[in-house]
Image (spheres, rainbow, N blue to C red):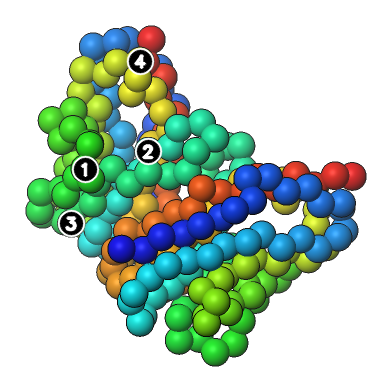
Amino acid sequence: AQKITQTQPGMFVQEKEAVTLDCTYDTSDQSYGLFWYKQPSSGEMIFLIYQGSYDEQNATEGRYSLNFQKARKSANLVISASQLGDSAMYFCASHSGNTPLVFGKGTRLSVIA
Amino acid sequence: GAVVSQHPSWVICKSGTSVKIECRSLDFQATTMFWYRQFPKQSLMLMATSNEGSKATYEQGVEKDKFLINHASLTLSTLTVTSAHPEDSSFYICSASDGTGGDYGYTFGSGTRLTVV
């Protein structure tokens, strides 16, 4: 079974600064994928970034990058140049094959002007 | 990109009535649909997994007779909350998979806020 741990219930960041949201995972599978989603107050789940377990390069998508450290089983999300609109809940999730996504408890990010 | 349309966005119903939530994949075949429930300030909790044409597999503790899931076609899955009670008030969200996994293998609907009064 897979398990995702997000140890930061809440984080604050100054506008235009970078912030790192932590995520560690536990899996016995060799092939797996790691996701980050943003959930604003409206509730929708917005896909941000994906990292496959065999990807050698860290994933990047615009201001989002994933710091993938396989040996440490961590997949931290880095948001650069934070914007007020980045304030939301952020969830780390994993899957293996076509299994359901397993989510962490989430981190609430607040961007301060 | 892949789109899943979920309706209604929000619904208020009286205790004892049933509510149906629909999720439609608009531009791909959803071979598998995952249904989640989310309480305020908590994470998404998997309720059930359904494959097209098969009975849904429910997670432990989820009442299959209360939360009826139908996945009769590759583009439509429904969740019916039967005899709803105030404790069923929650945010329900579906996630459709085309079976490929990977970065775009899961597409979420926009969610349904259910309030039972």
The amino acid sitting under disc 4 is Pro
Residue at image location 53% in from the left, 39% down from the top? A43
In the picture, measured across the screen, residue B8 lies left or right of residue A112, that is left
Q: Measure the C-alpha gap from mark 1 to mark 2.
A: 14 Å
Give the SS element for disc 1: loop
In the picture, measured across the screen, residue B95 lies left or right of residue B51, that is right
Q: Which residue is mark 1?
A: B60
Q: Which mark is residue B51?
A: 3
Q: Is residue A55 above or below residue B7?
A: below
Q: Measure the C-alpha gap from mark 3 to mark 2.
A: 18 Å
Q: Is residue A56 above or below residue B49?
A: below
Quadrant of residue B3 in the image? bottom left
Q: Which residue is mark 4?
A: B86
Q: Please provide percent x and percent y for residue A84.
A: 80, 47
The amino acid sitting under disc 2 is Arg
Check if mark 3 and mark 2 are on a common chain.
yes
